Image (cartoon, rainbow, N blue to C red):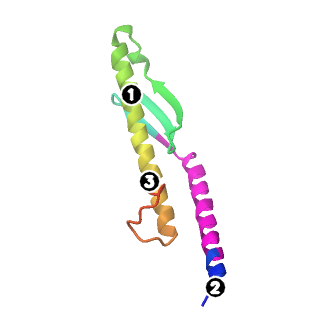
Amino acid sequence: MKSMEEMMKAAQQAAETIQKQMNEAQAKLDNVEVEGTAGGGLVKIRCTAKGRILGVAIDDSLIVPEDKQMLEDLVTAAFNDARAKADQAANQEMQSIQSGMGLPPGLNIPGFS
């Protein structure tokens, strides 16, 4: 039977391994790009899976002063679409890491859901 000290050391090493994998996953998520669109593609927003906005593209046909409110609404909708896709990509990556660690399905660990 292992001594308490050996078990504590093994637990600490496992925690360090998990932390390293989490840090690597977070870095990887900042390199995953998604694009949200609105208005049939007239407004596009690119962002990372961590939610960092990389760019906004607005079709020239939308730049009409009297349509300012519609343009603002479309930018908002495109951002929300990109954010939803970023959340989905992040969740998929976290689930992939969780399954690679041999953790049982449904185990609720912060950062993995």
- Which residue is the site of mark 3? 91
Q: Which residues are magenta?
A: 9-34
Nearer-N-terminus badge (3/1): 1
Residue type at tag 2 = Ser
Q: Position of residue 33 (x, y in %)?
A: 51, 43
The amino acid sitting under disc 1 is: Thr
| Few, some or many residues within 10 Å of mark 2 (<14, 14–19, 20+) | few
Residue at x 33%, y 28% (from the top left corner)? 39
Identify whether 34 is placed above or below 25: above
Q: Please tell me whether residue 70 belongs to the stretch shown in magenta.
A: no
Where residue 16 appears, as percent x and y from the top left, is 63, 65
Cα separation, mark 1 vs mark 2, equals: 58 Å
Sequence-earlier tag: 2 or 3: 2
Label 2 and label 3: CA atoms lie apart by: 38 Å
**According to the image, label 1 marks what residue?**
76
* Label 3 – label 1 distance at C-alpha: 23 Å
Horizontally, is 40 left or right of 15 in the view?
Answer: left
70 shown above or below 24: above
Q: Looking at the image, which residue is at 41% across and 44% down?
A: 85
Q: At numbered mark 1, what does the secondary structure look like: helix, strand or loop? A: helix
* Neighbourhood count class around disc 3 (C-alpha, 10 Å): few under 14, some 14–19, many 20 upward: some
| Magenta run includes residue 15 | yes
- Closer to the chain start, of discs 1 and 2, is 2
Q: Secondary structure at mark 2?
A: loop
Q: Is residue 42 visible?
A: no
Q: Residue at x 43, y 22 (%)?
A: 59
Query: Does 62 appear above or below 43?
Result: above
**Residue of label 2:** 3
